[in-house]
Image: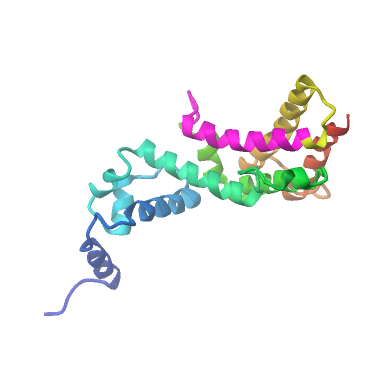
Amino acid sequence: MPSDRTPAKSALAERRGKPSHRDDLRNELLAEAVKVVAADGHEGLSIRKLAEAIGVSPAAPYNHFPDRRSLLLAVALEGYIRMFDETGSGMPDPDDADEDASPERLFQSFVAFIRFAMTQPHLFTLMYESELVRPMLAPELGEAQDRGFQFLRREIARLAPDLNEHERSVRVATIWSAVFGFAMQANRAMLRHQAPEPAPHDLAPEVVRQALRLLAA
């Protein structure tokens, strides 16, 4: 008697037959969750659907993620890893002391940050505007954000060494507000333009340049 299984159903059945405790299950779940969030946003992310997508029992993901919030948190942290890779702002550079102070690295990092917000809007929203940051910021996200903030403070200290601590703090807050505010508006598609006005992705470098002029003030 011929089987009524489609190739897709047969493949899923075969995957379901694999042990749910396989060593790479957490990474499989996280990779699939990141893909779902990047494509459609975090609101519809379901542990049950995630288990079905990679072919394990509905209970298997709970061995790695006890609830949906823990899964979202892992996805957000993966987003920070990807963003730091793109912006080069995640870890201190041991060669910093040997480099001449130049705004180019900070400029490129900010432009890459805005580009990440525009090209990964759903991940960016999870990282900065989701239930993970309201009403209280998840400590793990706070640590990730602090890594980026320390990069900003370190670069500004190198570029403007004569500023006292108060003046440096004002510059940091003002520059970050300008860049982050632009990134948020770009992420939400709030920046409207009509020809001959430049498009948001063309405006981004100019906004960053204007913000960094504060270092010369």
The x, y position of residue 99, in whole percent, is 79, 47
Residue 138 magenta: yes
Taking the image as shown, residue 174 lies to the left or right of residue 30, namely right
Colouring style: rainbow
The quadrant of the image that shows the C terminus is top right
Name the outermost residue toward the bottom: 1
Q: Where is 159 relative to 83, above or below?
A: above
Q: How many marks?
A: 0
**5 in relation to 98, above or below:** below
Q: Does the magenta portion include 153?
A: yes
Where residue 207 sits, quadrant-wise, is: top right
Q: Where is residue 203 in the image (x, y as percent from the top left)?
A: 78, 46
- Residue 11 at x, y = what percent? 28, 69
Q: For the view shown, which residue lies furthest in the left direction? A: 1
Query: Quarter of the image containing the N terminus?
Result: bottom left
66 vs 124, left or right, is: left
**What residue is drawn where x is 75% and y is 47%?**
105
Which of these two is toward me, 1 or 82? 82
The image quadrant of residue 64 is top left
Whole-percent x, y for residue 112 in the image = 68, 49
- Residue 49, compared with residue 210, is above or below; it is below
The prevailing secondary structure element of the residues shown in magenta is helix
Residue lying furthest top in this view?
A: 166
Residue 151: in sight, yes or no?
yes
Q: Is residue 203 visible?
A: no
Instruction: Specify the segment rendered in magenta.
Output: 133-157
At 15% across and 79% down in the image, what residue appears?
2
Residue in the image at 22% along x and 53% along y: 57
- Considering depth in this image, is 68 or 41 the residue closer to the camera? 68
Task: Report the residue at 37% width, 38% height from top.
Answer: 70
